[in-house]
Amino acid sequence: AAVCAILIKNRRRYMAYLRRRLGSLEEAEDALHDTYVRVLKASSQLADPDRVEVWMTSALRNTVIDCYRRKAARVRLLEAYAREVDGY
């Protein structure tokens, strides 16, 4: 319950952080949803409820890193595909 309350209370701040890092509202919304799902699934493992903010900050940062990695992988895939098509 404490985790949910903090997620609700800080949603705007989390969205602003993600939007600054990811550049679009749509990506930020998807990233926040993914982060909330992971955090809520793992919330029973949180030993110290007073550290939810720290834990959430770390989860958001990891989500941003995951998004950057996925973007980079898509770019590599498209570049490889373009080279393959150009070779025909």
Image: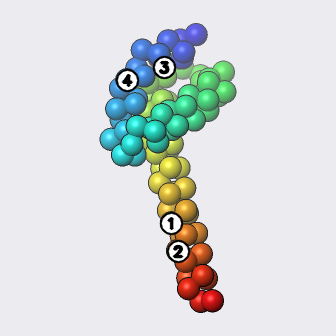
Q: Does 28 sit above or below residue 78?
A: above
Q: What type is the residue that disc 4 sits on?
A: Arg
Which residue is disc 3 drawn over? 7
Secondary element at tag 3: helix
Measured as percent of width and height from the top left, residue 68 is found at 47, 54
Q: Are marks 3 and 4 in contact (CB under 8 Å)?
A: no
Q: Which amino acid does label 2 sit on?
A: Glu
Instruction: Report the colour scheme.
Output: rainbow
Residue at (66%, 21%) from the top-left corner? 44
Q: How much space separates mark 1 and mark 3, taking CA atoms?
A: 32 Å
- Give me the C-alpha separation between circle 4 and circle 1: 30 Å
Going by the numbered disc 1, the residue's amino acid type is Val
Q: Residue at x 52, y 37 (%)?
A: 30
Asked if residue 10 can be seen in this view, the reply is: yes
Q: Which of marks 3 and 4 is nearer the N terminus?
A: 3
Say what secondary structure mark 4 lies in.
helix
Quick check: marks 2 and 1 in contact, CB under 8 Å? yes
Q: Which of marks 1 and 3 is in front?
A: 1
